[in-house]
Image: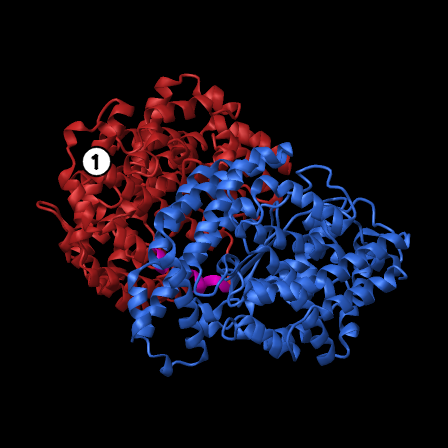
Chain colours: A red, B blue
């Protein structure tokens, strides 16, 4: 009885939360330009409803009355996740929540202007305030034995802790920095795909790619936005993309990436819809699904062969298949995380992970952040950051108060490489499939080993079961060494 | 203080109500086919929140504590509307509200199937249940001196009562029935526009029409749906349309119609946004805005001249301008309300108004409805209803529990004709403007006389002020007699 009442409450809350996400999708993809102010009122009103529901004291009563012995695995997972969220929500003082909402809303605008002007000093006071408030939040919410970072990380990667995460991610830095340096020193010149690629043809091919990677159009749609994302779950999962006439890979590979997220959401267990168990298990696992499709599969030689044929058909490109594969995987040093190749990407993440931990712990103050950024960047990338816009101001996350989010990107890459090894072992003819533009058995394998478990099994255990052992950075490093070693003749 | 607290509560509720309307728009215009079930959960959860907010007992406390003497006209209008709604909401028993929600949700599906099969008997039990429940609702909600119909009508046409409405609408029946018969007897053959009209060109012209009639694209957008509608207010008002390759007037005139609604919503007083005073004053006035633009302006000879030029440009039609004007205004007897011309339209409404009043009062039982429909149709239209699908089953309203809504369509037509007379008096060069595809002064006049007043002035008084006297059916009859008398040589 208590469990049923609890779940009924949570389901309604989750349905309203989805409405909030639809409002965000609408704002990015559909809303007329003048609608911003009204939309803020609507989102604010919904947020107030959600906050009241999430801190409803009846949740505590129901949790206390639940007899966990009578529950199945999904029920226990639900109670566990609801309890953890409720405890943290209860520990968050109302005025602190409001202060954070205000500071990040204001901070986001200040950040956008500061980035425009490439002026870190203009953002510094706002970020100082945000960091202060996030420290307070972490102190209020952290449980016995947890660090500040643990408390925030848990919102994105439930059950993961700072210590184990440092260990896993830490193993990436030296090998990646070394690989990057060897590629830079190789002197190998990889061709770039240049030309003009008609937007409507890019979109047609993007739709085909989505279908190829298992996206169910009956339960989704694709629209144009400034920054691509994926939203929704089960029977309504929407993807978005953007089109640059000169850079077709931007549209095509961002679609494969979002389809990885979308196919995950379309495959979570419907029986547990609108409960925690019926959702994604962690942001890291989410990102593993998008990265696996985008990189290990989508940027493989086999699939690039298929895509090359499509590019010849659609755009009449004259580049050969092997050069095309190299162009897709071209390694180029750069300052911007979101434009980074597979070799550089995680180095961008690692520095953010270290810097944001130092900020939270008080080892680093915001006043010193720009300097710390530049120093670290030069060490890891061998280049001098030219300005704040291409440095410390490039990402939206901190202005939005998202501390603890960055490492889930790198964790996703590590999970993706481990899943990729297991997938190749399970499907020996994977390359033959990819060369034909087929992914049916891949999706089936992912459904069975990842998607269908929703959040019933915790992420680390889920990944262990799927990959046959504890997850380490080794598969990712081996994959990158093999692929780029060959491409750059190392 | 009480007023401020009341308004803050109402504004949040109204913002959430707008979210609900956005969900409906999304469902019709955007949602992937598989999303229906999940959307029902989302709408149900939001509906529960809205119901709790609308019946929150604090509303009663705030209303009791408000000092109306300190309020301006908008404040008094707000208190008046909030009080009336609150009293009716309070009088609605929870189990009755739930029974109606269930019966109409089920009834809608039953109706759709029955209409498909053209089988009234299949819908009869569901409609009997709905009528029973609506009688109970009316009995619960009606105030001293109100009839059952008054109680339901008030939700759509606040302040209007059955008696005065019968008087106004009753004046239409004989003259319209007579005009219809004279046209049928005239033997005049009016040409039809035939051919194939490319959907993309129809949509391009539809966009131009929306701009011509004052639609602000910065605060709106247009999409395709099965049944066109308009949704939203102020800075986000969206219109919808549909395209039939063989029937360009379906798309073009439905867009002008929805633009009439939209320009009203884009022009309500922003200072009172999210309060009753800052919304539309009644459904009748809403419909007057759409009908004025669609019929009195959009189907005028002057505007048809401009549109004819566009049709020649876009589609190369060979019909002359005068024939085109006649084709736009072609009178054709038919069974379907939504396809009716200006002459027949209100006759469709009048019979529904009389039948639904009889149903509510218990003078007519659902078992006898199909017969009553056929009899009335033959009397007023001189034709025999061929089947239930083209008769009593054609409209969605009753299956949705919308009793009291139909007459607002006819009232809108009466208001539109009265406004049209006043508009012509204020703008002697109106035809010259329309002939050039210009509506700026029209929109300015409507802004000043209608839109900018929101719901601060009650509808009858607003219409009296705008038209210079009490509204009667005379302007509508005079307009139709003049226009169609000339077209059909009567």
Task: Please determine whether, in this image, residue B146 is positioned above or below residue A218.
Answer: below
Q: Where does the N terminus of chain B fall, quadrant-wise? A: bottom left
Residue found at x 85% / y 56%: B183
The chain to which mark 1 is attached is A
Left or right, A52 with respect to A32, comes to left
Task: Please determine whether, in this image, residue A305 is positioned above or below residue B291.
Answer: above
Q: Nearer the viewer, residue A478 or B305?
A: B305
State the count of labels: 1
Can residue B173 be found in the magenta stretch? no
Residue A70 found in image quarter: top left
Q: For the residue carrying disc 1, how many other residues have a C-alpha within 10 Å: few (<14), some (14-19), or many (20+)?
A: few
Q: Disc 1 on helix, strand or loop?
A: loop
| Region in magenta | A34-46
Question: Which residue is most to the front?
Answer: B363
Q: Which residue is mark 1?
A: A1
Question: Which residue is most to the left?
Answer: A144
Left or right, B385 with respect to A375, comes to right
Task: Please determine whether, in this image, residue B226 is positioned above or below residue B276.
Answer: above
Residue found at x 37% / y 83%: B69
Residue A373 found in image quarter: bottom left
Residue B28 seen: yes
Magenta region, mostly helix, strand or loop? Answer: helix
- Residue B359 position in % (x across, y down): 56, 49
Q: Nearer the viewer, residue A255 or B239?
A: B239
- Residue A325 position in % (x across, y down): 49, 32
Q: Where does the C terminus of chain B fall, quadrant-wise? A: bottom right
Task: Please determine whether, in this image, residue B292 is positioned above or below residue A178.
Answer: below
Left or right, A219 with respect to A335, comes to right
Residue found at x 44% / y 55%: B139
Can residue A38 be found in the magenta stretch? yes
């Amino acid at each position: 009885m208590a469990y049923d009442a609890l779940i009924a409450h949570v389901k309604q809350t989750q349905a309203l939360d989805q409405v909030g996400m639809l409002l965000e999708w609408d704002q990015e993809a559909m809303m007329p330009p003048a609608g911003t102010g009204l939309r803020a009122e609507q989102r604010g009103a919904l947020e107030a409803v959600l906050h009241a529901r999430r801190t409803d004291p009846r949740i505590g009563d129901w949790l206390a009355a639940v007899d966990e012995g009578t529950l199945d695995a999904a029920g226990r997972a639900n109670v566990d996740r609801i309890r953890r969220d409720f405890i943290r929500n209860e520990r968050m003082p109302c005025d602190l929540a409001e202060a954070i909402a205000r500071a990040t809303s204001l901070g986001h605008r200040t950040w956008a202007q500061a980035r425009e002007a490439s002026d870190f000093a203009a953002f510094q006071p706002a970020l100082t305030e945000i960091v202060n408030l996030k420290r307070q939040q972490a102190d209020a919410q952290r449980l016995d034995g947890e660090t500040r970072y643990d408390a925030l990380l848990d919102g994105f990667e439930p059950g993961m802790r700072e210590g184990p995460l440092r260990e896993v991610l830490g193993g990436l830095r030296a090998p990646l920095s070394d690989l990057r340096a060897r590629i830079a020193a190789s002197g190998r010149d990889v061709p770039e795909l240049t030309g003009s690629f008609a937007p409507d043809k890019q979109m047609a091919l993007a739709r085909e790619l989505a279908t190829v990677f298992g996206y169910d159009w009956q339960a989704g749609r694709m629209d144009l936005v400034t920054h691509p994302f994926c939203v929704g779950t089960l029977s309504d999962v929407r993807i978005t993309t953007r089109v640059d006439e000169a850079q077709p890979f931007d549209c095509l590979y961002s679609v494969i990436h979002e389809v990885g997220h979308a196919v995950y959401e379309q495959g979570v267990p419907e029986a547990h819809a609108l409960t925690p168990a019926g959702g994604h298990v962690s942001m890291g696992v989410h990102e593993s699904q998008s990265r696996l499709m985008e990189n290990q599969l989508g940027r493989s030689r086999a699939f690039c062969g298929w895509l090359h044929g499509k590019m010849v058909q659609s755009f009449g490109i004259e580049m050969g298949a092997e050069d095309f594969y190299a162009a897709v995987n071209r390694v180029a040093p750069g300052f911007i995380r979101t434009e980074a190749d597979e070799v550089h990407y995680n180095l961008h993440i690692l520095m953010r992970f270290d810097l944001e931990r130092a900020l939270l712990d008080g080892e680093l103050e915001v006043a010193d952040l720009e300097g710390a950024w530049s120093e670290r960047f030069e060490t890891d990338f061998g280049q001098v950051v030219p300005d704040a816009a291409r440095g410390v101001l490039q990402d939206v996350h901190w202005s939005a108060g998202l501390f603890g989010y960055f490492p889930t990107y790198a964790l996703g890459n590590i999970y993706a490489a481990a899943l990729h090894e297991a997938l190749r072992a399970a499907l020996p003819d994977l390359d033959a499939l990819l060369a034909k533009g087929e992914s049916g058995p891949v999706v089936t394998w992912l459904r069975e080993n990842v998607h269908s478990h929703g959040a019933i099994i915790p992420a680390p255990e889920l990944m262990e079961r799927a990959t046959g052992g504890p997850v380490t950075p080794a598969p990712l490093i081996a994959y990158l060494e093999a692929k780029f070693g060959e491409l750059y003749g190392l």
